[in-house]
Image (cartoon, rainbow, N blue to C red):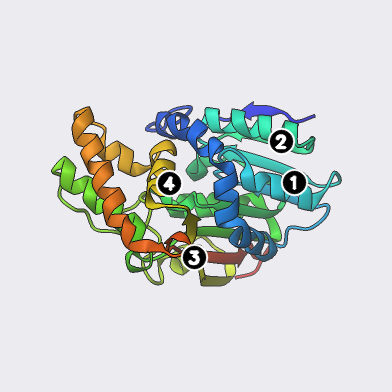
């Protein structure tokens, strides 16, 4: 039977559950079909890179509402096992509902900050993290804890956003929000932000510093295809985006003006077949070294 457990993150600054992600959980879950279409190919590539196979024991970090957890659970089959962790209790509750509806019972959920998993020695065969690692202010701690949760020879695969110039929709929206909020632009690789791990060479160096071997980082194109720029903005508004946090202190009309300008500026990506927003992700793969190896 699927179970839910809670873990003390061990971080004084961390709350038991993140209010930001709790707030965006339902919107993220309501767009599950759209997200699945957007990330279908890259998710399959991530599971391949992690070596997820029938019978595997897999750790899904920052699992959210469990979209990729469904894919992991189906791959490992009833003889395998999946532990889905997230910092949001609401996200995990939705994941439990989705997994239960799919009839998948070999999955547990656990409330945990990715930077303090507390799972050392768990001997997982594989770990995956889809679009979560970049939100960690201390990604090295997250990667080190992940390596400690893997068995020797266990594999990690993760997906994050790459450089700003290859993700123009994100940068355009952030720039517009900051302008309307009267907030100075920040450097794009600020820790804990959407593009924080896109700096060339940074992700590979962090994996090396965390003690992984066989590190490989490759760019992957993942265009976001919807009928119009308005559809894309509606998705962003419903999903707990950092853009929402920037605009939160503005009056209602001022927020509307900012969102309307984003829609207009994003129309540049309209094609005869609909709206196609460019996105480039980084798919990384690495291996936990054998005991005693350097």
Instruction: Mark 1 or mark 2: name the one nearer the start of the chain.
Output: 1
Question: Quadrant where the C terminus lies?
Answer: bottom right
Q: In front of the other: label 2 or label 3?
A: 2
* Dots 1, 2 in contact, CB < 8 A: yes
Q: Which residue is mark 1?
A: 73
Work out how far the residue at label 2 is from the one at label 3, CA to CA, in angstroms. 27 Å
| Relative height, residue 137 to residue 103 (above, below) | below
Identify which residue is drawn at 38% across, 52% down: 229
Rendered location of residue 114, percent (x, y):
51, 43
* Dots 2, 3 in contact, CB < 8 A: no
Rendered location of residue 263, percent (x, y):
31, 49
Identify which residue is drawn at 67% across, 59% down: 47
Q: Which residue is mark 3?
A: 282
Foreground: 240 or 129? Answer: 240
Instruction: Mark 4 or mark 2: name the one nearer the start of the chain.
Output: 2
Q: Which residue is mark 4?
A: 231
Kindly identify which numbered label has been placed on residue 196.
none
Viewer can see residue 10: no
Foreground: 158 or 161? Answer: 161
Q: Residues within 10 Å of mark 4 (few under 14, many from 20)?
A: some
Q: Secondary structure at mark 4?
A: helix
Viewer can see residue 221: yes
Kindly identify which numbered label has been placed on residue 99.
2
Judged from this view, the residue extending furthest toward the right is 79
């Amino acid at each position: 039977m699927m179970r839910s457990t809670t873990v003390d993150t061990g971080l004084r600054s961390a709350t038991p559950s993140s209010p930001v992600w709790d707030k965006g959980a339902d919107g993220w879950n309501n767009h599950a079909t759209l997200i699945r279409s957007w990330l279908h190919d890259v998710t399959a590539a991530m599971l391949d890179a992690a070596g997820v196979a029938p019978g595997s024991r897999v750790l899904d970090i920052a699992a959210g509402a469990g979209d990729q957890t469904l894919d992991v659970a189906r791959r490992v089959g009833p003889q395998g096992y999946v532990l889905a962790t997230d910092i949001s209790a609401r996200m995990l509750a939705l994941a439990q509902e989705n997994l239960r509806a799919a009839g998948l019972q070999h999955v547990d959920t656990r409330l945990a900050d990715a930077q303090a998993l507390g799972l050392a020695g768990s001997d997982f065969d594989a770990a995956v993290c889809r679009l979560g690692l970049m939100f960690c202010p201390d990604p090295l701690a997250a990667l080190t804890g992940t390596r400690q949760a893997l068995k020797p020879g266990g594999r990690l695969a993760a997906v994050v956003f790459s450089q700003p110039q290859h993700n123009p929709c994100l940068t355009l929206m952030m720039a517009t929000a900051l302008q309307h909020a009267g907030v100075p632009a920040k450097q794009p690789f600020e820790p804990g932000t959407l593009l924080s791990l896109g700096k060339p060479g940074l992700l590979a160096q962090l994996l090396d510093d965390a003690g992984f071997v066989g590190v490989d980082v490759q760019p992957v194109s993942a265009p976001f295809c919807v009928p119009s720029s308005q559809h894309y903005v509606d998705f962003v508004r419903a999903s707990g985006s950092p853009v929402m946090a920037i605009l939160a202190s503005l009056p209602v009309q001022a927020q509307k003006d900012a969102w309307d300008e984003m829609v207009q500026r994003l129309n540049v990506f309209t094609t005869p077949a609909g709206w196609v927003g460019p996105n480039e992700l980084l798919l990384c793969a690495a291996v936990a070294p054998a005991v005693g190896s350097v």
